[in-house]
């Protein structure tokens, strides 16, 4: 125990001792209510440059060699060609002609590295900064953001996932009120958010009153956080049903030209919905584009997926910039790992977690730069290595989250926003 305490900072040591006293002895070095108040008002790690996050997740392991870290002239490159961008010296795959014209807004990180080479474990690690365990669920960045910095719109959920609820991106051990709302089809609006046809407002109110009457005894007998969270969920849902903010989910309110510009597909429309939600003070929106697991037909499948990403990402950046929202909205493009330089017998590339690429834009990030470098084959990082927790710490840094602050799960285990990750501050302008 003494050895463990010596590894902690003074603040963490005091927090741990306070928690231990409360948990094991029934007393506290600081009253529990006071600790909660101190946590809620803790100072940020820095003054935030980003207010919101739009997180575009490429599920399956996007090939960096065929997207943002091409190796022109190398035998491992295959059929993918390289093109210039609007920033001198930065070149990317031919599959991103529109993004190439937005490169002055983007920071390209070519030196990501993970220690997780399986999909679920890799996604979990990328979203939470922690290795997947069977004994604990870790929060994702969206839930951390709302926990520390709160809601901006009381009527809308603060964390929304469009297309998929990726492992590690949920609320983890945090309270259910920090869990994301998952939306399948972005063009369907928010399902089940209106009073059912044929039911009057009076009947709906009477049903709620009857339900509350049935639940009163149960709630008074079991005064637990999870029971209270269930009630809070109903209260939030009812408040949303009666709010004009529901219009944020209605894509048909956008001009057809803009909808078409984002792309006539679920991902493109998801990016448009993300912009609408952020515009209405939703703090964290994740949009997933799957299909990047290219063990077979890598070059054909990457070209198809990249076309979807190119159109949606370029339009999103231009749209945010035109509306004056890019300065306070950080756009993230991430994936769980890269692909091998070797092309297999199925014309595909296999998993390769040792090196891959991600993108950042807006929210204080300095555009028009490349950070890090891989070797001639794109297999290993040779300069500026960025571990997954470092990448998440970099995002959290822009949000002003307290990276050094320790929070304890119900089981008494200590956790931080990005584990031991350190932000790459050079990316900020």
Image (cartoon, rainbow, N blue to C red):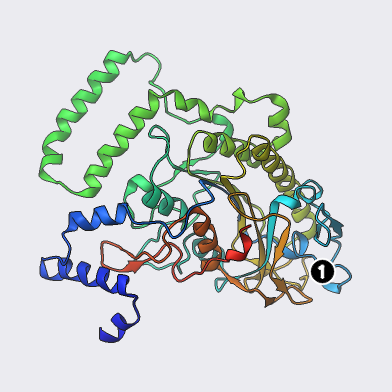
Residue drawn at 78 percent across, 52 percent down: 303
* Residue at the limit of the structure toward the bottom, as seen here: 3
In percent of width and height, residue 354 lies at: 63, 74
Residue density around tag 1, few if under 14, some if 14–19, many if 20 or more, within 10 Å: many
Secondary structure under the numbered disc 1 in the rendered image: loop
Q: What percent of the width, then of the height, locates residue 374?
A: 72, 74
| Residue closer to the observer: 209 or 370 | 370
Residue nearest the observer in this picture, 230 or 330? 330
What's the residue at 27%, 43% (across, down)? 229
Q: Nearer the viewer, residue 393 or 219?
A: 393
Instruction: Examine the image and state in which quarter residue 26 appears.
Output: bottom left
Q: Is residue 282 above or below residue 368?
A: above
Q: Residue at x 11, y 40 (%)?
A: 220
Q: Position of residue 136 (x, y in %)?
A: 35, 64
Disc 1 target residue: 71
> In the picture provided, is 346 more to the left or to the right than 334?
right
Q: Tell me the quadrant of the picture where the C terminus can be found.
A: bottom right
Residue 323 in the image: state x and y as whole percent. 64, 34
Whether residue 299 is visible here, answered yes or no, is yes
């Amino acid at each position: 125990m003494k050895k463990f305490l010596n590894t902690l900072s003074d603040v963490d040591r005091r927090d741990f001792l306070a928690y231990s006293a409360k948990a094991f002895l029934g007393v506290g070095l600081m009253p529990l209510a006071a600790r909660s108040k101190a946590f809620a008002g803790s100072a940020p790690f820095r003054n935030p440059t980003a207010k919101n996050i739009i997180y575009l997740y490429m599920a399956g392991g996007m090939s960096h060699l065929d997207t943002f870290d091409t190796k022109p002239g190398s035998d491992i490159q295959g059929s993918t060609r390289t093109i210039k961008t609007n920033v001198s010296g930065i070149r990317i795959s031919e599959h991103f002609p529109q993004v190439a014209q937005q490169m002055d807004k983007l920071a390209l990180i070519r030196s990501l590295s993970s220690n997780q080479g399986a999909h679920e474990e890799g996604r979990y690690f990328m979203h939470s900064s922690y290795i997947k365990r069977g004994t604990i669920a870790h929060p994702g960045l969206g839930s951390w953001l709302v926990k520390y910095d709160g809601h901006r719109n009381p009527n809308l959920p603060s964390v929304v996932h469009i297309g998929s609820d990726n492992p590690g991106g949920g609320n983890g051990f945090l309270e259910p009120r920090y869990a994301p709302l998952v939306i399948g089809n972005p063009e369907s609006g928010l399902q089940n958010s209106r009073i059912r046809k044929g039911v009057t407002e009076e009947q709906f109110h009477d049903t709620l009153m009857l339900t509350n009457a049935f639940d009163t005894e149960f709630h008074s007998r079991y005064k637990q956080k999870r029971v209270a969270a269930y009630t809070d969920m109903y209260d939030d849902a009812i408040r949303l049903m009666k709010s004009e903010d529901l219009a944020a989910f209605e894509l048909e309110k956008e001009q057809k030209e803009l909808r078409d510009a984002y792309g006539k597909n679920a991902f493109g429309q998801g990016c448009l919905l993300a912009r609408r939600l952020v515009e209405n003070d939703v703090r964290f929106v994740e949009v997933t584009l799957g299909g990047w697991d290219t063990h077979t037909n890598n070059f054909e499948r990457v070209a198809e997926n990249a076309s979807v990403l190119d159109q949606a990402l370029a339009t999103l950046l231009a749209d945010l910039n035109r509306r004056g929202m890019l300065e306070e909205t950080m756009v993230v493009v991430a994936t769980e790992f890269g692909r091998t330089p070797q092309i297999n017998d199925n014309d595909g590339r296999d998993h390769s977690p040792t090196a891959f690429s991600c993108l950042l834009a807006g929210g204080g990030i300095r555009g028009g730069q490349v950070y890090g470098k891989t070797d001639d084959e794109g297999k290993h990082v040779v300069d500026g290595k960025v571990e997954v927790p470092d990448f998440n710490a970099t995002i959290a840094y822009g949000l002003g989250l307290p990276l050094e602050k320790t929070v304890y799960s119900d089981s008494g285990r200590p956790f931080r926003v990005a584990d031991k990750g350190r932000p790459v501050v050079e990316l900020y302008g």
